[in-house]
């Protein structure tokens, strides 16, 4: 779980969150990531896609909720909140 793709993903997240980009998932990165996950959980719960606890943990229930949301909106159901999924969730 700590290979080059993971590090690149963390770095992309850090850029998006406006925190120092070092590729390590430390405290400075974790807080904004938790806020983002919580926003996904709450938004996906509104139309009934997410049924888990609001715990800011990107687990299997959230992953499935994202996939179900994507499928219901004609997107590729990959479970990743990319630009199109984000726009439909929060647009």
Image (cartoon, grey):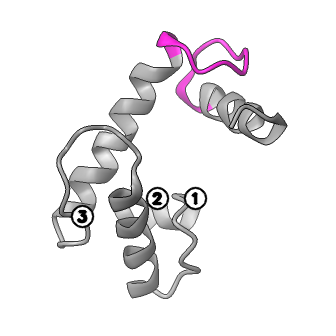
- Mark 2 Cα within 10 Å, few/some/many (few <14, many 20+)? few
Image coords of residue 83 (percent x, y): 57, 59
Res 65 label: none
Element type where label 3 sits in the image = loop
Image coords of residue 31 (percent x, y): 40, 20
Left or right: 59 as drawn, with respect to 4 = left
Are discs 2 and 1 less than 8 Å apart at CB? yes
Answer above or below: position of 78 versus 58: below
The residue at which mark 3 appears reads as 50
Image coords of residue 49 (percent x, y): 25, 71
Residue that extends furthest to the front in the rendered view of this protein: 1
Answer above or below: position of 11 versus 60: above
The residue at which mark 2 appears reads as 86
Answer above or below: position of 57 versus 74: above
Q: CA distance from mark 1 to mark 3?
A: 18 Å
Element type where label 2 sits in the image = helix
The residue at which mark 1 appears reads as 82
- Mark 3 Cα within 10 Å, few/some/many (few <14, many 20+)? many
Give the magenta range. Answer: 16-28
Q: CA distance from mark 2 to mark 1?
A: 6 Å
- At x 20%, y 56%, the residue is 52
């Amino acid at each position: 779980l700590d290979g080059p793709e993971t590090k690149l993903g963390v770095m992309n997240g850090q850029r998006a969150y406006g925190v120092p980009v070092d590729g390590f998932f430390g405290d400075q990165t974790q807080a904004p990531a938790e806020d983002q996950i919580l926003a996904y959980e709450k938004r996906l719960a509104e139309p009934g896609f997410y049924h888990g606890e609001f715990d800011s943990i990107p687990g299997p229930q959230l992953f499935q909720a994202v996939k179900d949301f994507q499928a219901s909106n004609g997107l590729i159901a990959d479970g990743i909140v990319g630009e199109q999924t984000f726009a439909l969730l929060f647009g």
